[in-house]
Image (cartoon, rainbow, N blue to C red):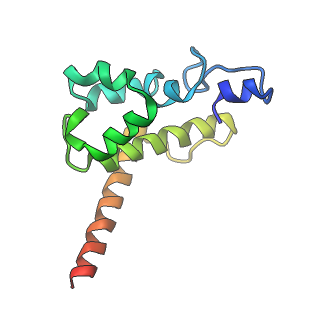
């Protein structure tokens, strides 16, 4: 639950983002617009698609990134896995701050996401090989 939702239900008085402390924290802010995540998207998204990437309705945004790897990503290879890993690690980092349990690993969010992408891709390749052989 984002801080905007927590505030709406009176679980907190502070609806600001714990990552940047600048904006109301809703899911769109956490996953796309926060200063902790936006630079990652700038690195990975085609320049001519960035405005659309940042403004698309959330469910459609997730679906397109998982189903159409070439639409937004500069490098489409394994984009669906990297995209999901970035969202997961962003939420995990946010929760570690909110619930006062800092992540043990100090590596960047993008580094952790790329490692998770590699591990997932390797596991999928091994599963495919096992099914074939």
As drawn, which residue projects farthest toward the bottom?
133
Above or below residue 3? Residue 59 is below
**How many numbered callouts?**
0
Q: Residue at x 33, y 45 (%)?
A: 66
Above or below residue 60? Residue 42 is above
46 horizontally vs 33: left or right: left
Which quadrant of the view contains residue 37? top left
Residue 55: percent from the left, percent from the top?
Answer: 38, 21
Q: Residue at x 39, y 24 (%)?
A: 38
User: Closest to the observer: 17 or 133?
Assistant: 133
Q: Residue at x 66, y 24 (%)?
A: 4
Residue 51: percent from the left, percent from the top?
Answer: 30, 18
Above or below residue 4? Residue 103 is below
Quarter of the image with the C terminus in it: bottom left
As drawn, which residue projects farthest toward the top?
22
Residue 50: percent from the left, percent from the top?
Answer: 28, 22
Q: Is residue 108 visible?
A: no
132 horizontally vs 7: left or right: left
Quarter of the image with the N terminus in it: top right
Residue 77: percent from the left, percent from the top?
Answer: 20, 48
Which quadrant of the view contains residue 8? top right
User: Closest to the observer: 87 or 107?
Assistant: 87
User: Closest to the observer: 133 or 35?
Assistant: 133
Q: Is residue 19 visible?
A: yes
5 horizontally vs 111: left or right: right
Q: Residue at x 54, y 30 (%)?
A: 27
Above or below residue 129? Residue 106 is above
């Amino acid at each position: 639950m984002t801080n905007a939702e927590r505030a709406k239900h009176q679980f907190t008085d502070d609806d600001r983002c714990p990552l940047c402390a600048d904006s109301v924290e809703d899911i769109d802010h956490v996953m796309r617009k926060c200063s902790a995540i936006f630079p990652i998207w700038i690195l990975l998204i085609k320049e001519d698609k960035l405005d659309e990437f940042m403004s698309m309705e959330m469910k459609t945004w997730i679906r397109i990134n998982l189903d159409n790897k070439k639409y937004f990503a500069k490098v489409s290879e394994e984009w669906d896995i990297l995209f999901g890993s970035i969202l997961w690690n962003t939420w995990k980092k946010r929760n570690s701050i909110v619930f006062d349990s800092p992540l043990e690993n100090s590596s960047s969010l993008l580094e952790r996401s790329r490692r998770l992408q590699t591990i997932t891709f390797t596991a999928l390749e091994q599963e495919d090989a096992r099914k074939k052989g």
